[in-house]
């Protein structure tokens, strides 16, 4: 299929469907960490997902690359430990979901600092707008109390961004194999962390009803496995840079659920800051898309989609 042609109805449905799944996944993380300790939630998610991902992991040899294991660690236990900790710390879902999109400008920034790939003016503008948007949103009195959680989520985004730029220098691996490798590291590391630091885990498990287990199962299968498989199918048909902007709708889904189900308060300042942040991320993504068309090379956004999905 020609990459220059318009996306088909099915491709649009898949792109928005993946974004919706990832938006729902944020809500599931918030729901689960409201009852269970964060490291336990992550360990359960990846232990369950590993049952499905193990056949992909065992199918064919794993390329001999230290970078590959570095990606699995950064995008596995490091990223998700910080991610679930931030959901556990946060009171509101909406600002946190928006801040998690900072991985795209972080990836562009790290690409400049580590890979010596200077950003274009468009990327620099996007970086500035995105970070200013988060600052405006975080300055709202309702969000100001969330600054520790936002700081932890920013560190989670930074870990993910580092994994994506490392993918630029690593042999290509099937995303589900990559997810399986990340799960191999994440499940035991986060499980051990829960055993050492989360002394209330057994009591919390006793209070976990079917909604908590449904949230964990959704994260394990719908997000970790199904959404990744669908995204891989999509980027096999289209340039990843063409579908990246559609992923920016995922925090909008999370914000809607945050207001409707978790009682989040959206003030005008939060809305303006969130819109600016998402807009800045969009500028970065669209600028990288234009750069890809001119140079024929891969972008940091593409590396993220080709390596692994959140």
Image (cartoon, rainbow, N blue to C red):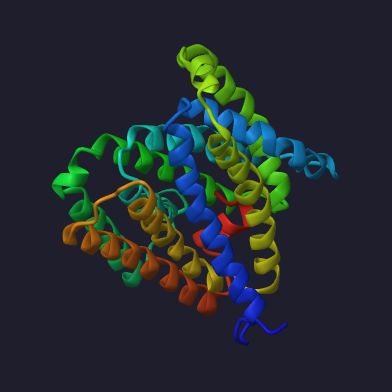
**Of residues 121 and 253, which is closer to you in this image?**
253
Q: Relative to 115, does residue 70 appear above or below in the rendering? A: above
Left or right, 49 with reference to 94 = right
The single residue placed furthest to the right in the displayed view is 60
Left or right, 261 with reference to 184 = left
Seen at 43% across and 60% down, the residue is 253
Point out residue 57 in the picture as x, y percentages from the top left corner. Answer: 78, 41
Point out residue 91 in the picture as x, y percentages from the top left corner. Answer: 30, 38
Point out residue 178 in the picture as x, y percentages from the top left corner. Answer: 68, 45
Seen at 17% across and 59% down, the residue is 269
**Of residues 143 and 159, which is closer to you in this image?**
143
Q: Quadrant of residue 109?
A: bottom left
**Of residues 119 and 161, which is closer to you in this image?**
161
Q: Is residue 120 visible?
A: no
Q: Relative to 95, does residue 233 appear above or below in the rendering? A: below
Q: Is residue 136 visible?
A: yes
Q: Relative to 7, does residue 249 appear above or below in the rendering? A: above
Seen at 14% across and 46% down, the residue is 141
Left or right, 32 with reference to 307 = left
Q: How many marks?
A: 0
Q: Quadrant of residue 305?
A: bottom right
Left or right, 102 with reference to 293 = left
Point out residue 155 in the picture as x, y percentages from the top left corner. Answer: 38, 39
Q: Quadrant of residue 126?
A: bottom left
Quarter of the image where the N terminus is located: bottom right
Seen at 21% across and 45% down, the residue is 143
């Amino acid at each position: 299929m020609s990459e220059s042609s318009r996306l088909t109805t099915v491709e649009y449905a898949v792109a928005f469907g993946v974004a919706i799944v990832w938006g729902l996944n944020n809500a599931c993380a918030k729901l689960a960490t409201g009852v269970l300790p964060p490291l336990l939630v992550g360990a359960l998610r990846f232990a369950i997902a590993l049952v499905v991902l193990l056949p992909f992991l065992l199918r064919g040899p794993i390329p001999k690359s230290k970078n590959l294991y570095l990606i699995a660690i950064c995008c596995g236990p490091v990223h998700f430990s910080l991610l679930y900790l931030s959901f556990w710390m946060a009171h509101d879902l909406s600002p946190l979901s928006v801040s998690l999109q900072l991985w795209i400008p972080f990836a562009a920034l790290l690409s400049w600092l580590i890979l010596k790939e200077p950003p274009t003016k468009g990327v620099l503008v996007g970086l500035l707008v995105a970070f200013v948007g988060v600052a405006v949103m975080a300055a709202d009195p309702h969000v100001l109390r969330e600054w520790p959680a936002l700081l932890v989520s920013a560190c989670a985004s930074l870990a993910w961004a580092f994994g994506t730029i490392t993918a630029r220098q690593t042999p290509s691996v099937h995303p589900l194999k990559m997810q399986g490798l990340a799960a191999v590291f994440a499940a035991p590391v986060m499980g051990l962390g829960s055993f050492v630091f989360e002394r209330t885990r057994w009591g919390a498990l006793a209070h976990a009803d079917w909604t908590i287990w449904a949230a964990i199962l959704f994260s394990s299968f719908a997000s970790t496995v199904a959404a990744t498989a669908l995204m891989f199918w999509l980027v096999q048909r289209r340039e990843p840079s063409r579908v990246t902007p559609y992923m920016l709708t995922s925090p909008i889904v999370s914000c809607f659920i945050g207001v409707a189900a978790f009682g989040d308060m959206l003030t005008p300042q939060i809305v303006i800051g969130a819109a600016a942040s998402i807009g800045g991320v969009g500028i970065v993504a669209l600028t990288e898309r234009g750069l890809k068309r001119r140079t024929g090379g891969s972008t940091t956004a593409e590396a993220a989609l080709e390596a692994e999905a959140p």
